[in-house]
Image (tube, helix red, strand yellow):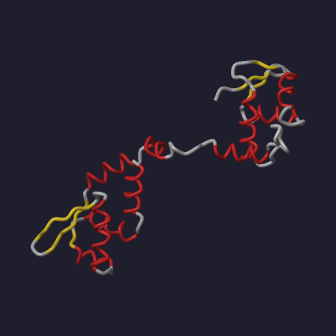
Amino acid sequence: MNEEWVSFYKALADANRLKIVGLLAQKPYSVEQLAALLDLKPATISHHLARLAEVGLVSAKTESYYNVYRLEEKALEERTRRLLSREDFQSAAADVDVDAYDRKVVADYKRRDGSLKTIPAQRKKLEAVLRHVVKAFEPGKRYSEKQVNKILERFHEDTASLRRELVGYGLMKREGGGGDYWRVES
C-alpha cells in the first residue's frame, strides 16, 4: 500500500499536474489544448499526462488525429477514499518504532546504574522519562507513599518531584491525604 500512496501523491505533487486534473475535471482536452491553456509545451503536457495515467487518474481516447484525455473520476474517488482513510494512514506508519524517541531521551538522561543524571525540564523529554520510570510499578498494585519513594529513589533523589509529575501527567493516581498510589493502565 505504501508504494501506491507514494506514486499517487507524487503524481499530484506538481502544480501543473493539479491544474491538468482540474481542467480535465471540467471536460476532456487534447494535449495541444492543455498546452495552450497552461502555456506549456506539448511535450511537457504529455509528460505530465503520462505520470497521471500511470496512477490511473487519466485515460486517453483517440478522436480524429488527436488523443483526447479525460479524468478517470471513479478511479480518483475510489483511490482517494481508500488512500485517505484513517486506517491506511495508520498502517503507513505501522513499521515505525514509536518508542524510539523515549529510548533516546532516557538514554541521554540515564546513568549506567539506571539512575537519572537530572530530571528533564522540557515537557516532552520529561514525559518520556516518566513513561520509563512508571514501568517500575506493577499495574493494578497499590503502593504506600513510602513504597513509591523507595522505588523512585532508584531513579533520582528528588522523589517528591517524580511522584508529583507521575500523578500530574496521569501516569499514576493517588488517593488524597497521603493515601495509596497506583499505576494507571495505559
Q: Nearer the viewer, residue 167 or 26?
A: 167
Q: Quadrant of residue 49?
A: bottom left
Which residue of the protein is positioned furthest toward the right in this rendering? 157
Q: Describe residue 26's horizontal placement relative to residue 156 as left or right.
A: left
Q: Describe residue 120's horizontal placement relative to residue 18 as left or right.
A: right
Q: How many callouts does the rendering have? A: 0
Q: Describe residue 186's horizontal placement relative to residue 19 as left or right.
A: right
Residue at x 31%, y 68% (from the top left corner): 20
User: Which quadrant of the rendered structure holds the C terminus?
Assistant: top right
Position of residue 177 measured from the top left corner of the image (x, y, whole percent): 86, 21
Vertical order, 55 against 159 (above or below): below
Vertical order, 42 against 61 (above or below): below
Q: Nearer the viewer, residue 165 or 152?
A: 152
Which residue of the protein is positioned furthest toward the left in this rendering? 64
Residue at x 83%, y 25% (from the top left corner): 148
Position of residue 30 measured from the top left corner of the image (x, y, whole percent): 21, 72
Q: Quadrant of residue 26?
A: bottom left
Position of residue 17 measured from the top left corner of the image (x, y, whole percent): 35, 68
Residue at x 28%, y 78% (from the top left corner): 43
Q: Describe residue 13's horizontal placement relative to residue 171 as left or right.
A: left
Vertical order, 71 against 46 (above or below): above
Position of residue 141 measured from the top left corner of the image (x, y, whole percent): 73, 18
Q: Quadrant of residue 18?
A: bottom left
